[in-house]
Image (tube, rainbow, N blue to C red):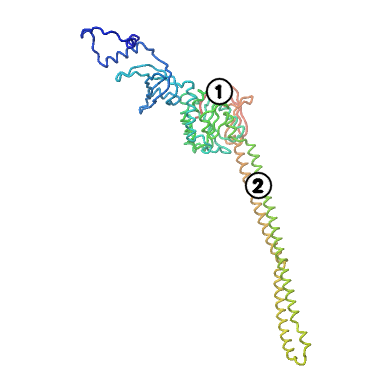
Amino acid sequence: MTDFFSAAESPPRKPVAAAPADSTPVRTVSQVNALVQRTLASNLPVSLLVAGELSNFKVYSKGHAFFTLKDARSELPCVMWRDSLARLAFTPKDGLAVVAGGYIKLYEPQGKLQLYVDSLLPKGTGALELAFRQLFAKLKEEGLFEVARKRRIPLLPQHIVIITSPTGDVIHDVLTTAYRRYPGLHAMLYPVQVQGSGAASQMVAAIQNVNRCAAALGGVDLILLVRGGGSLEDLWAFNEELLARAIAASRIPIATGIGHEPDSTIADFVADLRGPTPTGAAELTIPKAADLAAQLESLVQLAHRDMNQIIQQSSADLRTIAFELTSSVQRRCSLTARELQNLAAQVQRIEPRHALAQRSHDLFAVQQRLATATANRVYSRHQQVAAVQQNLAASSPQAILGRFAERLDHLAVALRRATMQSLAAARERLSGRQQRLEIASPQAVLRRGFSITTMRDGTIIRAAAQVHTGQQIITRTSNGEFNSTVGTLQQGNLF
């Protein structure tokens, strides 16, 4: 190859005499390209690392990528096959500075020199870090991190599924924390791989299967997706796009507890709730039974207080109504008294004594007629006064107050009845919740046929690996216990 390029770059020489025609072979284009390829293969390294800037990057329908690597002075055509492209953790973009690894080869049909790229790494930024940033920006723009789209975590989850590795301390720590806070909890383990190739696909399948089989499992209120700490590479399965979209599509709320508190994954941002650690996720989603009982007692006290306030307000309203009625009756009585005084004054003005003193001898006849008329008028006025007195008797304060007293009695009876009904309903709800708490207690679990097996020192046996053949163990049931000796050991998985 050195001779080939030095000959091409050497300064022009003086013309020489042409050789005989039969001494210089005539080659075809294919032969020349094959000669160039053999020269390249024998003189270039098997693999090269080339730094440059991506340009004209394009992925075609078959999945292969063609692009150009360039610097300030030159360009190099490149090709990357579909399998190599699929292994990239980031998305190549034009203008990105990269280091490409591969080999130089001539594409003989077109006489085109190309770099066949096997690996591609961002220059100055880790591939995983760049992939994290690209996926984070993409999902954020789609709204997958928005609080408005996230599902509400239930106040008291009764049935939860824990998706994690069946080995290690994480599942033990999460279950210990959960049962300590709420002994009546029903927890199920869905074992998956949480690290390495295929881990994200297993977790996606677990989320989809739990959603599909939730009814068959007796209802699932919450999914806990947890694992212990590790490096960015160890946690990378939780940064894959297919897992993020499965979390967002789940109908069941999902809480995550991945790694330690400083660790952040794409799954944490998409989840409905993020816990700082696996046990932190359990503490955030599972309330303490004692706290629930205290809240229930507080609600009962609040109901009693509200009922007392309603009774006091109703009594005040009744007193206001009674006062207004009394004032109305008093005003009516005063008005009626004034009307009677006016009637009496009118009667005084029409009295005929002044007419009798005048000419009695000339007006005797007139006196007779006037006396008759006066008697009739007085009788009519007496009839009016009697009617007014009857109306006053019917509108007296005593009669009105008597009717309102009966109404107050009816209202008081209805109020006492409503109070007793509300208190009875509150007691019935409290009794029902107490019964559910008793059903969920460890003793109730034992009475349903479960048992607890411990070593002689009281240590609870949670796995077959804790005991050995011939060891003495104690099994406790709801109404007693018995001793036994370990025989043949068999280990298996609940699922």
The one nearer the camera, 467 or 194, is 194
How crowded pointer 1 is (Cα within 10 Å; few <14, some 14-19, many 20+) is rated as: few
What's the mark number on residue 303?
2
The one nearer the camera, 489 or 62, is 62
Q: How far apart are marks 1 and 2 (CA)?
A: 53 Å
What's the mark number on residue 465?
1
Q: In which quarter of the image is residue 33?
A: top left
Whether residue 218 is visible, yes or no, is no
Left or right, residue 261 beside residue 199 = right
Whether residue 328 is visible, yes or no, is yes
Q: Looking at the image, is 318 positioned above or below residue 69?
A: below
Q: Where is residue 11 in the image (x, y as percent from the top left)?
A: 32, 10
Quarter of the figure with the N terminus: top left
Kind of residue indicated by mark 1? Ala
The one nearer the camera, 140 or 114, is 114
Q: What element carries label 2?
A: helix
Q: Position of residue 450 (x, y in %)?
A: 57, 33
Q: Which of marks 1 and 2 is nearer the N terminus?
A: 2
How crowded pointer 2 is (Cα within 10 Å; few <14, some 14-19, many 20+) is rated as: some
